[in-house]
Amino acid sequence: YDDAAVRLEKQLYSILLVIPLCSTKQGQEGPLWKNHLKILTVAQPPFNFPADGRHSANYGFVADFLGVMFKDENVTFEVSTLTSGGPEVGRSVDHAAGPGEYRELENELIAGRADVIAAPLTITWARMRIMRFSFPFMPANIVVAVKKPKDPGQKMPFRHLKELASLMAQNKLILGMMKGGATEEMLRESRYKMYSDIYREIMAKHNEGQPVLVENYHSGLHNVRNSSNFAFLGDEVSLAYLSTRPPCDVMIWGKPLNTAFYGLAFPLNVPRRFVDHVNQRILRMQQFGKMRRLKDKWWDNECIGSIAAPRH
């Protein structure tokens, strides 16, 4: 976690200490919302992997996170994975989720066919108008992925983030991102000049026919691997996972462009006391290191020993 995330966690934990913890034990106050929750996620490692020979059901960070979240709670839940044909229990697909899946997640929640979205869903102003979010459970900062140099002394495509738009205008760098995702929304809606300049140059390259707007992260990293001057913008959590998997030929370079977070999402009519209870569980997991252990488990580095340039 970065410093901003740690500061926010401390602030939220202090705020939540004044909120009474509502019990879900039968015979006391009863269920805070529902006895059975329909939880929806997407097929995106390491958040959610399909069942295999060693696992009878989908597994990954989301399954472990929810298991800890609702441990000792008087509630049952089922987790469905959204596929191109809609949500299916215990089924996944072998690709990284794209913007279409996230729009479907939102639609399923709004239509009442899901109670909770547990996925790498960035908390944004636009989404907060149509759903309620829990407190953040993980940072979702936007970073840049580049091709890993074969030689530690090899020149990198840029030195500072403020150079990105200028290098793109000079055709010295091509910068891509996922079409319709939180990264595009942030760049498009921002009034910060560096962001708006980057967005303008990306769209200019798109209008020229360059493959800068992709459907998912795998497509973006494919472009990075096959071009020395192609870089890809995306959330740090997803790129940190994908860049530490074979063939170990991409890396995150530079500092994050922003500070953003993932949160659990609920319908707007969810009871306040249920969200308060979930928030307190999240903060307790962070306070006592359970979230850190889950992150270390699922974001382990399989590329240790390969050449990596330091962040700066």
Image (spheres, grey):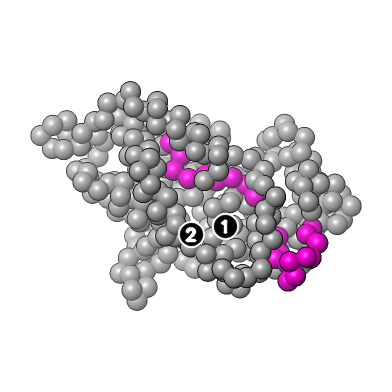
Which residue lies under the disc numbered 1?
240
Disc 2: which residue: 299
Residue type highlighted by circle 1 = Ala
Could you tell whether 190 is left or right of 277 in the image?
right
Range of magenta residues? 135-157
Is 208 situated left or right of 141 in this image? right
Which one is in front, 273 or 302?
A: 302
Residue at (45%, 35%) from the top-left corner? 9
- Look at the image and tell me whether residue 282 can be seen: no
Our reading of the magenta stretch's main secondary structure is: loop
Element under disc 2: loop
Q: Position of residue 173 (x, y in %)?
A: 81, 56
As drawn, is 108 to the left or to the right of 284? Answer: right
The image shows residue 228 at horizontal and vertical percentages of 78, 66
Residue farthest to the bottom? 53
Label drawn at residue 292: none
Residue 10: quarter of image: top left
Query: Which element carries disc 1, helix, strand or loop?
Result: helix
Q: Quadrant of residue 74?
A: top left
Q: Is residue 111 above or below residue 158?
A: above
First in sequence: mark 1 vs mark 2? 1
